[in-house]
Amino acid sequence: MSEDVDYKLVPTPETMVLSNGKRRAALGDFAKAAIDALQAGRFGQGSVERRSRNANAYTRLDVSYESAFPKPAALRGHLLVEFNHSPLRLEPDKRLVAPAARQVGSRRLRRPVRGRVHRPARSLDGKNRGLSAPTLDAAG
């Protein structure tokens, strides 16, 4: 069994004016920082395998770990982390996510958390074809 975490890295005007080489280097540095953070945590050295394409605009990190639970032969400790650096197709909707967070956790938040919820991309037949992950920031 594997867990997947997908991150949408939305280009800013500052990153779009960088040369292709500098943008590629910056995205490569971001991926290296993510690998360092995973390995410094509980995953350990050598647990992350990186594959990047499209001048580092897409990076896939395969993270292996030893499960704390006994596992049948079909289950394996694996985490897939993907970074996609590309513009949003639609404008984000801002929604208050604090009420949902309060239902999940027992602690009350000091200030509400606002998130950008991205609408699913729809095909011509009207079916959802994917939803980018919400990004959260503290409301102030």
Image (cartoon, helix red, strand yellow):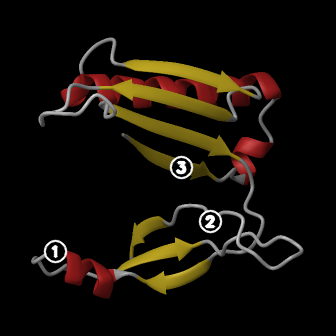
Q: Amino acid at mark 1?
A: Gly
Quick check: marks 3 and 2 in contact, CB under 8 Å?
A: no
Secondary structure beneath label 2:
loop
User: What mark, if any, has residue 7 been given in the picture?
Assistant: 3
Q: Amino acid at mark 3?
A: Tyr
User: What mark, if any, has residue 50 been given in the picture?
Assistant: none
Secondary structure beneath label 1:
loop
2 or 136: nearer the viewer: 2
85 or 44: nearer the viewer: 44
Q: Is residue 119 left or right of residue 72?
A: right
Rounded to the nearest angstrom, the CA distance separating label 3 from label 1 is 23 Å
Mark sitting earlier along the chain (3/2): 3
Mark sitting earlier along the chain (3/1): 3
Q: What residue appears at the point 36 percent right and 32 percent down from the top-left corner?
A: 78
Rounded to the nearest angstrom, the CA distance separating label 3 from label 2 is 11 Å
Q: Is residue 17 left or right of residue 48?
A: right
Quadrant in the picture for the C terminus: bottom left
The residue that label 2 is drawn on is: 131
Q: What residue appears at the point 20 percent right and 33 percent down from the top-left corner?
A: 71
Q: Amino acid at mark 2?
A: Leu
Residue 53 found in image quarter: top right
Q: What residue appears at the point 78 percent right and 73 percent down from the top-left corner?
A: 122
The residue that label 1 is drawn on is: 105
The percent position of residue 117, horizontal first and vertical second, equals 55, 74
Q: What residue appears at the point 19 percent right and 32 percent down from the top-left corner?
A: 67
Which residue is situated farthest in the top direction here?
A: 46
